[in-house]
Amino acid sequence: MIKVLIVDDEPKLREGLRALIPWEELGYTVVATAANGLQAQEKYHIFYPELIVVDIRMPGMDGLELIGELREEGSTSHVLILSGHADFEYAKRAISYRIDGYLLKPVDEEELINYLEELRVTIAQEDRFSRWNEEEPARNRESLLRTLLQPSTAEEGENDPVKQAAALGLKSDRVEVILLELLAPAGGSEEGERAVKAAVEQYFGSSEERMFFTMPPYIGFLLQEPLPGKQEQERLMEELASLICREGYNFSAATGGPVAGPEEAAQSFQVARELLRRAFFYRKGILISADLSGMLFPGVAEAYTEEGQDAESRLMLAVETGSRAAIEPLVDTICAELLAAGSEEQQIKDTFVRILSTVLARLEPVYPEIRSNAAKHSPPIGELYHSHYLADLQEQAVNFMAEIADQMSSGSKGNEIKKITELINRRYNENLKLETLSELFNYNSAYLGKMFKNTTGEYFNTYVDKVRIEKAKQFLAQGMKVYEVAEKVGYMNPDYFNAKFRKYVGLSPSSFRKNI
């Protein structure tokens, strides 16, 4: 609100102006009134109003004398003169005191309101200009710091880091750059981001040991006293989290490590920036450093696979059979394999989006409601692309597939043999193994095989063969060639398919097709 002082020797006029004008609606607040120039001078030095509405003729010190005194003191307050006399000489003197308006009594309400609306715009512009001037030294300092953090162009003799450091008053033997990248929440705005940056700058920027800077998309500090150890790093992260997370944002932070003097600050900045570009692969909530111990997977995990059955296939089987407990370790294994192969962030995200999409595509023909049910309880698969950390991506993928696995197991809990026979009838063309399924169901393979034989009357492999042969009959009846049918039902060797077909049908596939 713009502060207003009303000065007039007539009490009714003073109070009338206070009550007549909708000051608050217009962006003003009347902080005081005065009956003469001397009172007004005293109250001016208490409230420092941006606008003075003053009568031109008063006993003792009149309005023009008051304004003259205040102008000599350096006051820049805006002034509206009230007068019951259309006195040209007064008007001329008023102009010399930089008066904003001259109103005759009785005051016309509409005319005064027009003045107030115009002045509000003028005062707002002046306020912005004043703030700009106040911030100018800080902007110049930050500009110098940004230049220092850029690689020097020695050939042209520009951006000399020694000169930049001297201009900034940096004398430390060792400095360190801490770099932050803000992670906006869904629906985050530029205004919200500015508020976060302002909060961080206000908290840290005034310290002599920490020089705040912005270098989009990053913000950061140049520390003239590098962080001495892990405890101090953790404390800094806690302070940053308390400022940033309470605004609904998250962040990644990296240190470029100490360097020998401010002249080498650009080197620390470059290291921190490269680490932030790899933040996806580090644990959340840590100050990332060149020490690889902070990585999510410091080494390559032992692959949870067996011959002929890769982790992706096992993961899909785990989801399809409702084997919830097997999902997380398989997701971990896939991540470890991708990292061991040197996969980048985008490749890892693409892989998991493909796996989840394939799971839905495999199940949808048999369970049409599976996609809509998953959508009710889990974010869209595309949300994986917005994961800031590998740990977040893993958690999202596990939760999504666990939700589907729960749907697959509902209503048939404990009936593992039924799940297996249904799976065989859907996936007869795949390399299904009893050993794999026994691990998914957490059974000894021999015990599960015995359960399967007792329930179905067939050994597992025999049951698979018979399902395949029945499907082969259907494809042969459709006129497909023998080698095509062999591949379609899961036999990569046509001769092996011929032998199996003869065993269970009593004649070759070709003869069977001729006799249809």
Image: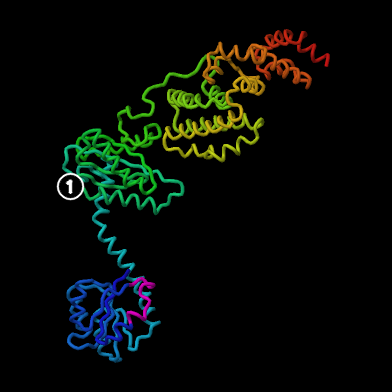
The residue at which mark 1 appears reads as 169
Percent across and percent down for residue 438 are 55, 17
Q: Is residue 474 above or below residue 356?
A: above
Give the amino acid type for the residue marked by disc 1 in the picture.
Gly
Identified at 38% across, 50% down, the residue is 193
Q: How is the image coloured?
A: rainbow
Identified at 52% across, 19% down, the residue is 442
Percent across and percent down for residue 435 are 55, 14
Query: Of residues 349 and 416, which is closer to you in this image?
Result: 416
Residue at the right extreme, as displayed: 515
**How many marks on residues?**
1
Give the quadrant of residue 358: top right
Percent across and percent down for residue 503 are 72, 7
Q: Residues within 10 Å of mark 1 (few under 14, many from 20)?
A: few
What are the residue bounds of the magenta stretch? 17-28
In the structure shown, which secondary structural element does the residue marked by tag 1 occupy?
loop
Q: Is residue 399 above or below residue 147?
A: above
The quarter of the image holding the N terminus is: bottom left
Query: Does the stretch in magenta take in 20?
Result: yes
Q: Is residue 323 above or below residue 124?
A: above
Give the quadrant of residue 473: top right
Give the quadrant of residue 235: top left
Query: Of residues 211 and 354, which is closer to you in this image?
Result: 354
Identified at 59% across, 21% down, the residue is 416
Query: Does the stretch in magenta take in 196?
Result: no
The quarter of the image holding the C terminus is: top right
